[in-house]
Amino acid sequence: MIAKNLCLLFHSTVVFSMKNRVLQVLSVVLLLALVQVGSGTPNSTYLPADAITYFPDTEWTSTTPEEQGMNSTILADMMQFIEDSDAPIHGLLVTRNGHIVEEEYWSYYSETSTHHIFSCTKSFTSTLIGIAIRECFIDNVSQKVLDFFPDMTIENMDARKEAMTLEHVLTMTTGLDWNEHNNSYEDPTNMYNQMFDSPNPIQFFLNLPTAYDPGTHWVYTTGASHLLSAIIQVTTNMTTREFADEYLFGPLNMTLGGWNQDLQGINNGGTQLYITLRAMAKLGLLYLSNGTWNGQEILSDEYVCQAITPQATIGTDLAYGYQWWLDTAYNTFSARGSEGQYIFVAPEFNIVIAITQGADDYGEDIHEEILQYIANSIIDAETTTNTEMDLLLPIIGIGAVAMVAVVVFHVRKS
């Protein structure tokens, strides 16, 4: 049912601003209690069932919603809701079968505006790791992390740190003693700030003591995402930005703004990428098309499968892949960033949704309502009555509240 696939993306919603210290501590405790690491076995149901045959290049064709099996009246109602809500939304792009069925911008934003996508950056960085493997700069995800940095003297060495692999970094199961949720991101003592304020952030991260066996414990770790960027740089002899320009941004004709670097000149692998809404949607389309773009293989289908397969179970129906969030019950996946940045992918319906917002407070984030309208607009799927939707709303609300207590996401710098 449509209600069990697109609408229930809400179950994996998380809060991006947690300023109450009591809630922060509670969230971390509950998160640690719920985490179980998955087997990593590919789940073929995540792979697209239908091939995308249209790929946008310099121009992107828009069609009527009805041509793509969607109800234009409901989508018009959605746009009116957005206008009436006075929400701090900056851009919304909905594609089906590769075609744009809805695109709108607010304030001073346009299709050429680049936007800070915060932690959605992580999914781009993971994609670049997959490309580096395909292009033979990296052998595979089983490579030991420390082998990428043979000239670096690492502190707190032990067998567990030596066993850490690239896949552990991709899945945020490094085992290193990291906690970026113990205080505000505005606090200089936050571990994220300590890392990036240090002269050598990668050295800082790898020097951390190990707290768990790699692969056994999931912890939200922006340091791991940045380590991925460093690995790209040392294996390709290019900055991550330069590598992305040649192998991803260029082939997909993505418009990029800036991408901040650390003090060592390494592009931030976990945040601070500025890119257009259309570029965000194109990343979703790349995964929807199994890594192939208009006949050109950008990512191997094997890497796509692993990236959107549950590698670590975080809570009920919520898992983590290779820097992607996964709704395990309903076969959807997403990239998410602070202040309401999203890339949602629903393979069953060939739908990709990209949203940019400036939602400082979680209550300003209207992505749940947007997804509800889009789910209701699909007219070539099994019909869901208004009564069924009404019954789902309290469940959706409970799911969102539960996730507040389970996962703390980036606030300002991710």
Image (spheres, rainbow, N blue to C red):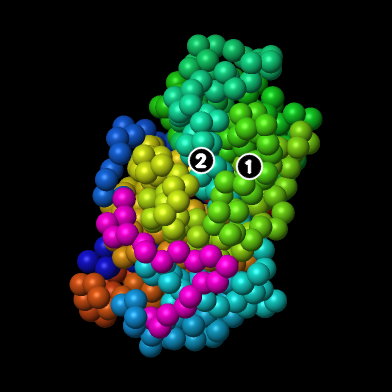
Residue 269 makes an appearance in the image: yes
- Compute the Cα span from label 2 to label 1: 9 Å
- Toward the viewer: 171 or 257? 257
Q: With 5 as the anchor, is 227 left or right in this view?
A: right
Q: Badge 1 local density, few (<14 within 10 Å), some, or many (20+)?
A: some
Relative vertical location of residue 19 with respect to residue 128 in this rendering, above or below: below
- Toward the viewer: 11 or 300? 300
Asked if marks 2 and 1 touch (Cβ < 8 Å), the reply is yes
Q: With 127 as the anchor, is 52 left or right in this view?
A: left
Location of mark 1 (residue): 243
Name the residue type under label 2: Ile
Q: Residue at x 42, y 54 (%)?
A: 295
Location of mark 2 (residue): 131
Kind of element beneath mark 2: helix
Name the residue type under label 1: Phe
Magenta residues, start to end: 47-65
Q: Residue at x 52, y 76 (%)?
A: 103
Q: Residue at x 40, y 59 (%)?
A: 345
Relative vertical location of residue 250 with respect to residue 278 in this rendering, above or below: above
Q: Whole-percent x and y of residue 369?
A: 44, 73
Kind of element beneath mark 1: helix
